[in-house]
Image: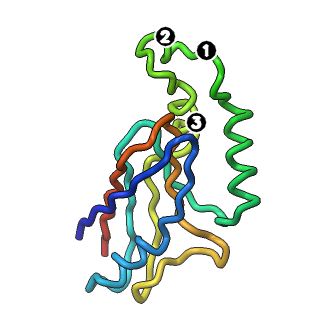
Amino acid sequence: MKKTIKINTKGNTDIINITEKVNDILNKSKIKSGIINLFVKGSTLALTTIEYEPGLIKDLKEAFEHIAPENKDYYHNLKWGDGNGFSHIRASLLRPDLTIPFENNKLLLGIWQQIVLIDFDNRPREREIIIKKIS
């Protein structure tokens, strides 16, 4: 089974909780147990799990700004002139994919874990997440 989720993002380290969208797809499937793999198309995107709460969202954004500041000269910007070198550095520290087991059509996440999409790019876009269930 393969499904796609399309999400409009704001860019600029936009952190979006997609757990419910993934659960909806899982619940509509006839496959009860296995693993689910999520993949985002785009070199400035990442998927991870976090405790999705306002304080941590702010902390995470500040941490990424500290690690790869937006207002720094990057060689990528010199080559392409698009000003998003920082977003590629940030995305490379995480992954474009995530694999999560499920049982009885329920994601096996920790009590405070949610699945998030992070868009590090410097502008809004429509993004696509591919979800594949494997029994």
Q: Alpha-carbon neighbours of circle 1 within 10 Å: few (<14), some, or many (≥20)?
A: few
* Amino acid on which the number 3 mark rests in the picture: Arg
* Amino acid on which the number 1 mark rests in the picture: Asp
Mark-to-mark CA distance, 3 and 1: 15 Å
Camera-side residue of 41 and 132: 41
Q: Alpha-carbon neighbours of circle 2 within 10 Å: few (<14), some, or many (≥20)?
A: few
**Can you identify the residue that label 2 sits on?**
78
Q: Is residue 47 left or right of residue 32?
A: right
Q: Is residue 87 left or right of residue 99?
A: right
* Amino acid on which the number 2 mark rests in the picture: Leu
Q: Position of residue 93 (x, y in %)?
A: 58, 39
**Can you identify the residue that label 1 sits on?**
73
Quadrant location of the N terminus in the rendered image: bottom left
Q: Is residue 62 left or right of residue 87?
A: right
Q: Mark 1 or mark 2, which is nearer the start of the sequence?
A: 1
**Can you identify the residue that label 3 sits on?**
90
| SS class, disc 1 | loop
Tell me whether circle 2 and circle 1 mark residues in contact (CB < 8 Å).
yes
Q: Position of residue 68 (x, y in %)?
A: 65, 30
Rendered residue at 47%/66% (across/down): 18
